[in-house]
Image (cartoon, rainbow, N blue to C red):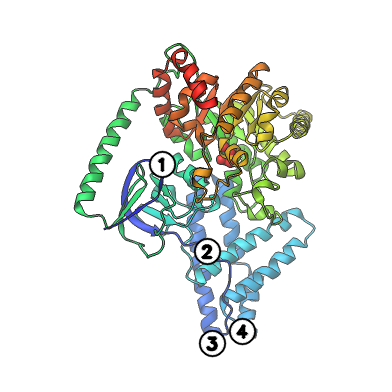
Amino acid sequence: MITISGKAVCGGISRGSVFVFSRKESTIKRSHIESSEAEIARFEKAREKAIEELSMLYDKALNEVGEANAMIFQIHQMMLEDLDYIESIKNIITDQMLNAETAVGQTCDNFVQMFRAMDDAYMRERSADVKDVSERLIKILSGRDKGGIISDKPVIIVSDDLAPSETVQFDKDKLLAFVTEGGSTSSHASILARMMNIPAIIGAKGILSDSYDGHDAIVDGYTGTIYIDPDDETIKKMEEKKREADEQLKLLQLLKGRDSVTKDGQKIELCANIGNVLDIGAVLKNDAEGIGLFRSEFLYLESSDYPSEDVQFAVYKDVLSKMINKRVIIRTLDIGADKQVDYFNMPKEENPAMGIRAIRICLTRPDIFKTQLRALFRASVYGKLAIMFPMIASEWEVIKVLEIVDEVKKELDSEGIAYSKNVELGCMIETPAAAVISDILSKHLDFFSIGTNDLTQYTLAADRQNPDIGEFCDTHHKAILRLINLVVQNAHKNNTWVGICGELGADLELTELFLSIGIDELSVTPTAILPIRKKVIETDVSEIKESMLSKYLD
Ligand code: PEP
Ligand code: MG
């Protein structure tokens, strides 16, 4: 048995085989070939396999996200049938006696250039699809086609770290646990693990040094330990621990349907964070009082091209209808930094966390922003929608955003399209600047939602993606807690309500503090809702307020 320890980011115990997730490399090995017939046959075999994969992806997407979203996989299949594309690859193989990977790579570059030079915007955008299908072919040809999980049974994913664009391609039914060598508690792989309520460990040094692929393992997400080839004693111990944890969970179920009110009558709203319509099952199962953060950027990460207004409308309508008049806060796209999307073609930045991301993209590329706003307002008639804007740092940004919102509403009015007149508008407080000027910002907005993941990284100058930052990223740092307190005080003066949607909101050690400073809402991963409700119900704010304020803020 081999025991490796890391940092626990999501509790739970899982047993299964290890699946080492290998990242696709973008470099193509160029080589000369002996026989063009054999190479063309190899290319044809890869092409068939790619078409088969795409047809499976189409069926899966059709079930999970509907026809409009699934369509892209059909378009990709059609591209693989395109005679010009196929002929170009075969010509490079025969004329230059080059391997199929190189031929596909060269053809891809030529086609991308050709598409990009076209006048028609739709055709220009097809360049991303050519890249995508070509990468699929190259992956298959070079034997690097382990993109998603290739296994019929659920597995423990082991990796160096996982980008959001990688986690979205996993088949969620096949995930037992995540173990990464890098990563951080607020990285998106950790957030996804909490969302799915599967055990997760980060910083597990050595997990990748040997090939543990296919080995039996147990992940203890409470202590941050992974046991590879566990012995009988460990298996027994872990089974017992899992039984006890399941018992605790059963007790929490009794809190469903109860109000989240303290002993002395202070109410707090407990909502859920989601990244996908499919997460709504977990939201309802855990008795969330609404959705406090829908990370809409996952819609963009999951597509290979800009999602159209209609596609977005269908998704937002679905979420709002399913939540049956409970408030749903949809955050406008938060692309950039660790959430990169190829087809946005963003210039490479030295320091993307401080670059053109989130609202900065929306304000510099208003067409993309307006498409999303139109879809949101059109969907607003199907439920109780609130919209929030990420990465605000200055008052002018809020003013500009509100102007664009007004333009969109006017457009809809002139087209006779209905929308709700009660959509609340708010912004994320995730830059120290926004927290400090929250008195000014609150005059313009109905609510704030504090994004402690980014607020912590920017306040402490501590990269949220860096697993080695350790003690320098103290999530209970007084600077953060004082900023949260300041935001609540400023906001309440202008009747603006305040929630927390960063990971700190689920920190049970701070629930009493959040109640003491008067936070109105906490939006957390669905499985954290009932444990927080238990804490809220057991708290008497009048008894603990003074000591909480002095312990954490003085
Ligand atoms: C945050 O920054 O706290 C937040 C909720 O946004 P994200 O984690 O998606 O950056
Ligand atoms: Mg953020």
Callout 2 crowding tier (Cα within 10 Å): few <14, some 14–19, many ≥20: some
| Residue under label 2 | 24
Helix, strand or loop at mark 3:
loop
Element type at mark 1: strand
Between circles 4 and 1, the one closer to the viewer is 1
Q: Nearer the viewer, mark 3 or mark 1?
A: 1
Q: CA distance from mark 2 to mark 3?
A: 27 Å
How much space separates mark 4 and mark 2, taking CA atoms?
27 Å
Q: Residues within 10 Å of mark 4 (few under 14, many from 20)?
A: some
Point out the tag, 4 or 3, that comes first from the N-terminus: 3
> Mark 1 highlights which residue?
10
**Residue 360: in sight, yes or no?**
yes
Q: Which mark is residue 94?
A: 4
Q: x%, y% of residue 143?
A: 47, 70
Identity of the residue drawn at 51% across and 24% down: 514
Q: Which residue is mark 3?
A: 35
> What is the distance, in whole Å, between disc 3 and disc 1 at their CAs?
53 Å
Q: 258 left or right of 125?
A: left
**Tag 4: residue type?**
Thr
